Image (cartoon, rainbow, N blue to C red):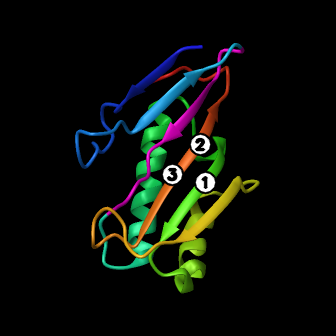
């Protein structure tokens, strides 16, 4: 098993130097598991931030030969659970196939005070897609 930690070129860089955006775990069939750090985004509304988060996740996955359709697990942290439907509307625009396994939590605050949502995912790369 080979594990690679890093921050893909062309993707938004971490907010601090204390973590990697992606952990890539190679498996025997030539594919890999991708563990993405929690992502936040700028924006005035939860919908704006949610769109930014999924756009960033898309860039990070593509840098490793995966797409949003390859997500197998998603964890969402919301500062206001009453806005779950608003988040869900945006999420469904990006995750259009069979939904991945999922957990959603309400938290009192996130890393950045202005952040309303943070999302982390696990994805699996198909054998036929090369790492970026």
Residue behind mark 3: 120
What quarter of the picture does the N terminus occupy? top right
Q: Nearer the viewer, residue 104 or 127?
A: 104
Assess disc 2: are there few (<14), some (14-19) or many (≥20) residues with their C-alpha within 10 Å of its C-alpha: many
Q: Are marks 2 and 1 in contact (CB under 8 Å)?
A: yes
Stretch of the chain drawn in magenta: 29-41
x and y, in percent, of residue 130 in the image: 55, 20
Left or right: 117, with 18 as reference point? right
User: Quick one: which residue is furthest to the front in this view?
Assistant: 108
x and y, in percent, of residue 88 in the image: 60, 72
Q: Are marks 3 and 1 in contact (CB under 8 Å)?
A: yes
Residue 38, above or below 5: below
Q: Is residue 99 magenta?
A: no
Secondary structure of residue under mark 3: strand
Q: CA distance from mark 3 to mark 2?
A: 7 Å
Q: Is residue 30 magenta?
A: yes
Counting residues from the N terminus, which is met first, the one under dot 2 or under dot 1? Answer: 1
Residue behind mark 1: 74
Secondary structure of residue under mark 1: strand
Secondary structure of residue under mark 2: strand
What quarter of the picture does the C terminus occupy? top left
Residue behind mark 2: 122
Q: Residue at x 56, y 69 (%)?
A: 105
Residue 69, above or below 96: above
Q: Main secondary structure of the magenta part?
A: loop
Q: CA distance from mark 2 to mark 1?
A: 7 Å
């Amino acid at each position: 098993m080979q594990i690679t930690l890093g921050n893909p070129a062309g993707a938004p860089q971490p907010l601090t130097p204390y973590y990697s955006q992606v952990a890539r775990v190679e498996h025997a069939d030539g594919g890999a598991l991708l563990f993405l750090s929690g992502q936040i985004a700028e924006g005035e509304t939860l919908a704006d931030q949610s769109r930014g988060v999924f756009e960033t996740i898309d860039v990070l996955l593509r840098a490793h030969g995966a797409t949003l359709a390859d997500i197998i697990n998603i964890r969402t942290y919301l500062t206001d659970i009453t806005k779950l439907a608003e988040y869900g509307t945006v999420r469904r625009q990006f995750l259009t196939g069979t939904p991945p396994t999922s957990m959603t939590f309400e938290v009192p605050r996130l890393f950045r005070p202005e952040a309303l949502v943070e999302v982390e995912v696990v994805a699996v790369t198909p054998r036929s897609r090369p790492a970026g």
